[in-house]
Image (tube, rainbow, N blue to C red):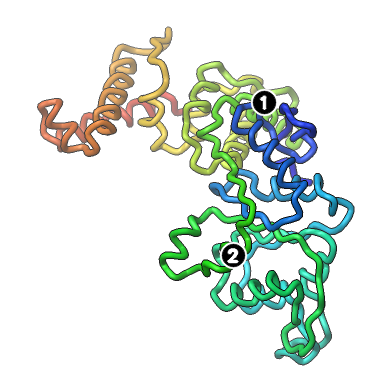
Amino acid sequence: MTDELGETIVNSKFSLKDIGIIGNSQPMKALARQIETTARCDLTVLITGDSGTGKELVARAIHQQSGRAALPFISINCGALSETLLESELFGYERGAFTGANQKQKGLFQAAHMGTIFLDEIGEMSPACQVKLLRVLQEGAVRPIGGHNEIAIDVRVIAATNRNLGQEIGAGKFRDDLFYRIAVLTIETPPLRKRSSDIPLLVEYFLRHADEKMKCPQRHKIEEEGLTALSVYSWPGNVRQLRHVIERLVATTFESELITTEAIFRALPASLLSEMATQLPIIFRENDSLDDFLDCMLLRAYEQLRKQTGSHSKAARLLRIDRVSLYQRVERARQRIKSSVAP
């Protein structure tokens, strides 16, 4: 199994490290309890959450803790295939059902018989495919494309989405009757911004694995200020994004033991500078100039005002400066900070 989220033990009867999840924050402890409870109930499950939060790992954990653990767990990404290909993959087809169907092919529902099938990104499924899936859930049977007979199956269905299916239903893009079928039990995977206390654990785990993967001559460490910077970032790409950033840092500082705060600034998006300026403690370091210090203060004050007022123009009025001049000052400060941390 891919260790996408890491490892740890939480206050639960099983260890999240066994399914590749790291975190001892309260949201992760609650997630562990939900996995245990859900695994005991042989009902359909809908897992919601942002991209990169480990929804498939949660689905695998439910399967592994259930009575179906010794039987197949089959995963498919509904958004990665065309409508026709997804239908043939899920339901199978008879020989001659369409051009190229030279032999009979079992679908994934049949392959997952007595086990679990995981339908990732179910919100991407076409309306026609939704109708066929609904029938499978209602009848407990699947009819291959081009076939006339239904084949009985016993499969637990776990679905996942990063979309708001309530809004999709309102827009006519997702069937409400299918939603009620798949959302008998629901689990939400917490985004990284809601469990930031887990970031140091994740960083250490990803550092260790990146060092081993790249065969680094030494184990990397991160400056304390740099770790603070990583901890205050909102991480829109969640754990997946954090892992990729750590791997990039290790690759670009291969010969060095210490990953500096400057290296972290270079590895993260330029737009992050203003976000960090509002959250990091302003520390005057020995090698900083007065201009460096004032630039950080300016960005912090500007971002806080812009957040409070909701616009650049209102922030400019409060500072009694025209918006163009304020924009130019902020951009100069950002560019000076970027150049001060450049290699």
Q: Specify whether 288 is left or right of 121.
A: left
- Few, some or many residues within 10 Å of mark 2 (<14, 14–19, 20+): some
Q: Nearer the viewer, residue 27 or 270?
A: 27
Q: What's the residue at 71%, 78% (across, down)?
A: 88
Residue matched to label 2: 79
Q: Closer to us: mark 2 or mark 1?
A: 2
Q: What's the residue at 71%, 56% (across, down)?
A: 43
Q: Specify which label sits upstream in the sequence, 2 or 1.
A: 2
Q: Position of residue 291 (x, y in %)?
A: 29, 16
Q: What's the residue at 75%, 81% (across, down)?
A: 143
Q: Specify whether 261 is left or right of 207.
A: left
Q: Position of residue 1 (x, y in %)?
A: 79, 46
**Amino acid type of the residue that numbered disc 1 sits on in the rendered structure:** Glu
Q: Is residue 258 above or below residue 65?
A: above
**Amino acid type of the residue that numbered disc 2 sits on in the rendered structure:** Gly
Q: Position of residue 172 (x, y in %)?
A: 44, 70
Badge 2 marks a residue whose secondary structure is: loop
Q: Is residue 103 above or below residue 244?
A: below
Residue matched to label 1: 204
Q: Nearer the viewer, residue 316 or 60?
A: 60
Q: Position of residue 237 (x, y in %)?
A: 53, 43
Q: Residue most toward the top?
A: 286
Q: Which mark is residue 307?
A: none
Badge 1 marks a residue whose secondary structure is: helix
Q: Is residue 128 above or below residue 181?
A: below
Q: CA distance from mark 2 to mark 1?
A: 33 Å
Q: Nearer the viewer, residue 94 or 205?
A: 94
